[in-house]
């Protein structure tokens, strides 16, 4: 057995031991069926609903004519923030006798955050369009009949 | 002549399944992206595990454990990192799972016994990770949609997650090392994608971190708590009304008793406590749910009260609340904490008498301790 195999075997032993410790704790102290429902349910919902929805959104953004990457970035950031914020927006944890628990108007606040993300994306799109036009204009000013090929920034610096 | 329909053969179901991996056209589903995301995710999960263990063992120390009372902000920082860092890791997990998603559809699904076992361990890893993040995010929003006790399930599942992670790291180490150490020559725009994921984590952190870092409170627009909101500018987790202690806490016949392994039993009224030397301590109240706020507490040193009863230096003290039930109606105070001059039986906060919801007439406040152990509506100290 070489060093690589030995360390891999050690990692497997340690990992399996930790899994066993966790499983024993779950079996001893947690209603197993309910726990398993959430353990498997989260994975199935993720693989069968969330990711297909993301893939569909990705395919749809493929139709965007320009600035596709900016649009996708804004959607990824907005969606992630929404996923994390959805429980406070729905506000099931609110209690009348504890007003300092979930004290903010989270629906409105999420709207503002998404608005800021959208505005940032719009700014990036405008900047991109303006620089593209300037570049195209500069190229034709020098007498080029066709549009100059777009160089990446790295190439332009060289 | 045979009708055209007859000649049409739908593709066999296995052929459809076999074709799925080839339908993922984005080149971001590659090893390099998976490796960078995996490294970041691995670090984050291990940090969450470590900080989670700190919280668990502060609340339920093993027999040999003796937590120090300093640094004052240790628990505040570790639990803030655990919760806010955990929230910021959600985009990392989702991005990593998206990147490797085509591998879910590999065909044939199981090639051998070993391959099957490896895939089972990957399922354990994915299931445990999603379980931890989903229950964690729901817990900080106080949304108990599940019918198990969050703390216990989250704690034990953490071992399953880290165990599966250790095995995954061992399996992927060589591949990840090779792919992140070589300069790619393929012109795939990975940097933009990775920066986007980092941006998502950043926005999540920025809109929640103010619940623990008070100067950033105005930015905490998506945090479940906000410093400055609540009686005397401090949030409350459990109100007197919800606990059913209002009448007893307001009763002028309220007394604090010191009993157990003492030289003499002591009974103190609120006036007696106010007559003892008063001290001020600036200490945070740091919740297991990640939020924390510093306040200026005023009251009697716990050690002064214990000395009145003639308590041994190595004594353990159980602080008991007026609450009749609940996991946190009592808490243990070990010698390092009750010896600390910052540990108070607080009678006031931020320049006013303690609000009822903050534990009037008297509560415990000690440095480097989870909020759930800063017992409110204290009525007894039992020494052992």
Image (tube, rainbow, N blue to C red):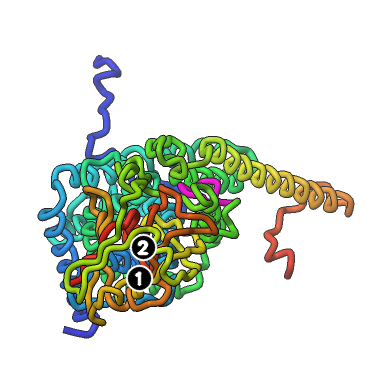
Image vertical order of residue B350 relative to residue B10, above or below: below
| Residue B311 seen from this side | yes
The quadrant where residue A90 appears:
top left
Q: Position of residue B204 (x, y in %)?
A: 50, 52
Overall secondary structure of the magenta section: loop
Residue drawn at (42%, 36%), measured in percent from left and top? A91
Q: Quadrant of the N terminus of chain B?
A: top left
Q: Which mark is residue B31?
A: none
Residue at numbered disc 1 = B302
Q: Quadrant of the C terminus of chain B?
A: bottom left
Do circles 2 and 1 both sit on a common chain? yes
Residue bounds of the magenta highlight: B219-226
Q: Nearer the viewer, residue B13 or B377?
A: B377
Chain under label 2?
Answer: B
Q: Nearer the viewer, residue A131 or B39?
A: B39
Residue drawn at (78%, 47%), measured in percent from left and top? A130
Circles 2, 1 touching at the beta carbon (< 8 Å): yes
Q: Is residue B242 left or right of residue A149?
A: left
Q: Is residue B345 left or right of residue B382?
A: right
The quadrant where residue B343 appears:
bottom left
Instruction: Say which label, 2 or 1, has the lower sequence index.
Output: 1
Q: Which mark is residue B364?
A: 2
Q: Nearer the viewer, mark 2 or mark 1?
A: 1
Real-space Cα separation, disc 2 to disc 1, in angstroms: 8 Å
Q: Position of residue B262 (x, y in %)?
A: 20, 74
Q: Position of residue B75 (x, y in %)?
A: 39, 68
Q: Is residue B225 magenta?
A: yes
Q: Is residue B104 left or right of residue B293?
A: left
Q: Counting other residues with Cα less than 10 Å from the Cα at mark 2, is it few (<14), some (14-19), or many (20 or more)?
A: many
Q: Nearer the viewer, residue B263 or B201?
A: B263
Disc 2 is placed on an element classified as: strand
């Amino acid at each position: 057995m070489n060093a690589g195999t030995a360390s891999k075997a050690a990692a497997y032993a340690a990992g399996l031991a930790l899994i066993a410790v966790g499983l024993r704790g779950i079996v001893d102290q947690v209603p197993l069926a309910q726990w398993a429902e959430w353990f498997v349910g989260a994975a199935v919902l993720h693989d069968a609903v969330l990711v297909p929805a993301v893939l569909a959104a990705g395919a749809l953004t493929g139709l965007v004519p320009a600035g596709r990457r900016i649009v996708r970035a804004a959607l990824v950031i907005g969606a992630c923030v929404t996923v994390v914020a959805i429980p406070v927006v729905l506000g099931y944890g609110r209690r009348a006798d504890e007003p300092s628990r979930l004290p903010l108007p989270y629906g409105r606040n999420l709207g503002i955050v998404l608005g800021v993300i959208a505005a940032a994306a719009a700014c990036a799109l405008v900047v991109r369009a303006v620089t593209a036009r300037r570049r195209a204009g500069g190229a034709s000013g020098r007498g080029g009949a066709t549009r100059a090929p777009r160089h990446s920034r790295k190439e332009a610096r060289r | 002549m045979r009708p055209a329909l007859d000649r049409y053969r739908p593709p066999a179901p296995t052929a459809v399944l076999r074709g799925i991996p080839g339908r993922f056209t984005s080149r971001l589903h590659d090893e390099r992206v998976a490796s960078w995301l995996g490294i970041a995710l691995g670090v984050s999960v291990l940090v969450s595990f470590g900080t989670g263990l700190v919280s668990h063992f502060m609340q339920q120390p093993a027999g040999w454990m003796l937590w120090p009372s300093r640094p004052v902000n240790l628990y505040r920082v570790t639990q803030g990192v655990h919760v806010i860092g955990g929230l910021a890791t959600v985009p990392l997990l989702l991005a990593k799972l998206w990147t490797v998603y085509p591998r879910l559809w590999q065909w044939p699904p199981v090639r051998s016994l070993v391959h099957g076992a490896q895939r089972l361990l990957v399922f354990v890893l994915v299931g445990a990770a999603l379980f931890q993040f989903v229950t964690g995010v729901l817990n900080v929003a106080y949304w108990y949609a599940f019918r198990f006790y969050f703390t216990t399930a989250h704690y034990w599942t953490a071992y399953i997650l880290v165990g599966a992670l250790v095995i995954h790291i061992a399996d992927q180490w060589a591949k990840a090392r090779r792919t992140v150490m070589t300069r790619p020559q393929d012109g795939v725009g990975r940097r933009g994608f990775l920066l986007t994921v980092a941006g998502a984590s950043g926005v999540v952190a920025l809109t929640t971190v103010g619940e623990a870092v008070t100067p950033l409170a105005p930015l905490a627009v998506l945090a479940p708590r906000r410093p400055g909101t609540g009686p005397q500018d401090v949030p409350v987790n459990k109100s007197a009304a919800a606990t059913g202690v209002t009448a007893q806490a307001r009763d002028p016949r309220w007394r604090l008793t010191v009993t157990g392994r003492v030289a003499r039993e002591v009974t103190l009224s609120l006036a007696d406590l106010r007559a003892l030397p008063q001290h001020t301590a600036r200490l945070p109240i740091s919740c297991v749910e990640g939020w924390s706020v510093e306040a200026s507490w005023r009251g009697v040193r716990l050690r002064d009260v214990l000395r009145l009863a003639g308590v041994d230096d190595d004594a353990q003290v159980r602080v008991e609340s007026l609450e009749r039930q609940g996991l946190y109606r009592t808490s243990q105070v070990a010698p390092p904490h009750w010896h600390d001059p910052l540990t108070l039986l607080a009678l006031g906060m931020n320049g006013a008498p303690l609000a009822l919801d903050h534990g009037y007439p008297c509560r415990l406040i000690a440095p480097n301790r989870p909020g759930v152990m800063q017992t409110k509506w204290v009525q007894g100290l039992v020494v052992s």
